[in-house]
Image (cartoon, rainbow, N blue to C red):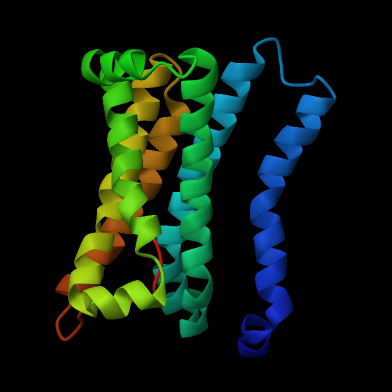
Amino acid sequence: MKKLLLNPWTRRVIFAACLLPALFLVVRGFKGNLSANPVEFLEHSTGDWALRFLCITLAVTPLRKLFEQPLFVRYRRMLGLFAFFYTSAHLLLYFTFDLMFDFKSLLADVLKRPYITFGMAGFLMMAPLAITSTAAMVRRMGPKRWQLLHRLVYFCILAGVIHYYWLVKSNVREPLMYAGILTVLMLYRVVLWTTKGTKPQKSAPVTA
């Protein structure tokens, strides 16, 4: 496995795989196969993939421990940045097609509609994580301050789950599924941090 994780082609394959959801949406758009409400379909799809990539990013540490393979961390930054990419696409679609680039309407929605408030909060917390995801930023900030900042990712996904839950209102199975995944990942971290003789590991530059 070590040889596979060190292979440059592995990174390229994972990068391509992360782009596939966006490419499928583009292809479906050209084919006119985006359901009866294309904008809603695109917004929901990009939002779903944002949450999925956040979950995958947070799962890197448990997988690293499970397989006793620290090289998994090499791919965490990429996964985190793709989570930010799909989150940004989700917000851009909403701002473009629902609000027609109207900042006043955006501010009104943030202040008056709780699910928009949580969605925007999640995005605003993710932005500094993406900006500071490089090794150079780790050196500039210092590992401790960098790691403390990047723990915001838990609040990002929590905000995303609440946003999704309040958005769908009735069919809450999917947001509850994400909430369950987040709970398991958080419990794992709590156990990791509280186990005698175990301390949080210093992480490579990632949005997680």
Quarter of the picture containing the C terminus is bottom left
Q: Quadrant of residue 159?
A: top left
The residue lying toward the viewer, choosing from 175 and 141, is: 141
Which residue lies most toward the bottom here?
Answer: 3
Relative to 134, does residue 153 appear above or below in the rendering?
above
Residue 6 in the image: x percent, y percent?
A: 63, 86
Please name the residue shown 35% across and 49% down the image: 127
Compared across the picture, whether 156 is left or right of 197 comes to right
- The residue that appears at 31% across and 75% down in the rendered structure is 138
State the image quarter where residue 16 is shown: bottom right
Q: Is residue 148 above or below residue 39?
A: below
Residue shown at 46% from the left, 58% from the top: 80
Q: Is residue 47 left or right of residue 6?
A: left
Q: Is residue 123 visible in the rendered structure shown here?
A: yes
- Residue drawn at x 53%, y 36% is 89
Q: Which quadrant, please, contains the N terminus?
A: bottom right
